């Protein structure tokens, strides 16, 4: 069982790293790039003895308590069989 | 038009950051975590004048040339209308 966790900055939070990437790609000649925001991505392999609901619960808890900072970040969890 | 780019380490490449997270969650009492790998995630807002194919081409090129290191990383691009 595999869990995928996506952590992104909340919409109001400044993202200087994303802005730096946006500026860099503009300098490199890419056009039409309106905004870039960087987030984090985790692939978590979970014990196969867990069922779908158990895996989701465990991954959500990890995302909330360990992988994200709830003050400035949102997270999303996907479970793959 | 929004592009989402996921950058992950190729499967043979060691991921010490992922291993550190795995070790940390084990110490925190989470059980059943077999493996953790960390990747990067980018949300790129593109000019609406681009059509679907143009947006994908532009995002793929950015992912290949700027956002990933093709020696050790793979990337995946998703386009949202």
Image (cartoon, coloured by chain):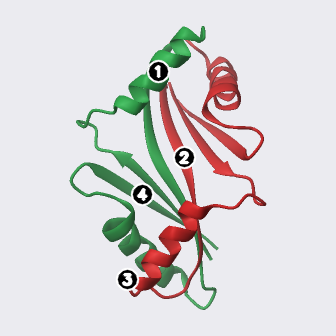
Chain colours: A green, B red
Query: Label 2 near label 1: C-beta < 8 Å?
Result: no
Q: Earlier in the sequence, mark 2 or mark 3?
A: 3
* Badge 3: chain ID: B
List x then y, in percent, for residue A77.
46, 62
Q: Are marks 3 and 1 in contact (CB under 8 Å)?
A: no
Q: Which residue is mark 3?
A: B28
Q: Are marks 3 and 4 on the same chain?
A: no
Name the mark nearer the viewer: 3 or 1: 3
Residue B35, horizontal then vertical, whole percent:
61, 74
Is B68 in front, or is B51? B68
Cβ–Cβ under 8 Å for marks 1 and 4: no
Name the residue located 32 percent from the left edge and 52 percent from the top edge.
Answer: A74
Q: Chain of mark 4?
A: A
* Mark 4 neighbour class, 10 Å CA radius: few under 14, some 14 to 19, many 20 or more: some
Please report the residue visible at 69 percent of the width from the left and 37 percent of the height from the top: B69
Identify the mark nearer the N-term, 1 or 4.
Answer: 1
Is residue B73 at least partly visible in the picture? Answer: yes
Q: Secondary structure at mark 2?
A: strand
Q: Which residue is mark 4?
A: A76
The subunit carrying tag 2 is B
- Where residue B78 sits, quadrant-wise, is top right
Could you give the CA–CA distance between mark 1 and mark 4, rounded to whole angstroms? 24 Å
SS for callout 3: loop
Element class at badge 4:
strand
Where, quadrant-wise, is the C terminus of chain A in this rendering?
bottom right
Mark 2 highlights which residue? B40
Which residue is the extreme one toward the bottom? A49
Discs 1 and 2 carry the same chain letter: no
Instruction: Say left or right for B10 vs B27.
Output: right
The residue carrying mark 1 is: A22
Are marks 3 and 1 in one subunit?
no
Mark 3 → mark 4, Cα distance in angstroms: 21 Å
């Amino acid at each position: 069982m595999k869990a995928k966790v996506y952590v992104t900055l909340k919409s109001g939070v400044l993202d200087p790293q994303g802005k730096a990437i946006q500026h860099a790609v503009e300098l490199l000649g890419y056009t039409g790039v309106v905004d870039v925001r960087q987030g984090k991505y985790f692939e978590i392999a979970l014990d196969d003895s867990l069922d779908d609901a158990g895996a989701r619960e465990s991954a959500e808890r990890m995302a909330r308590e360990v992988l994200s900072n709830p003050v400035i970040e949102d997270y999303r969890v996907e479970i793959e069989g």
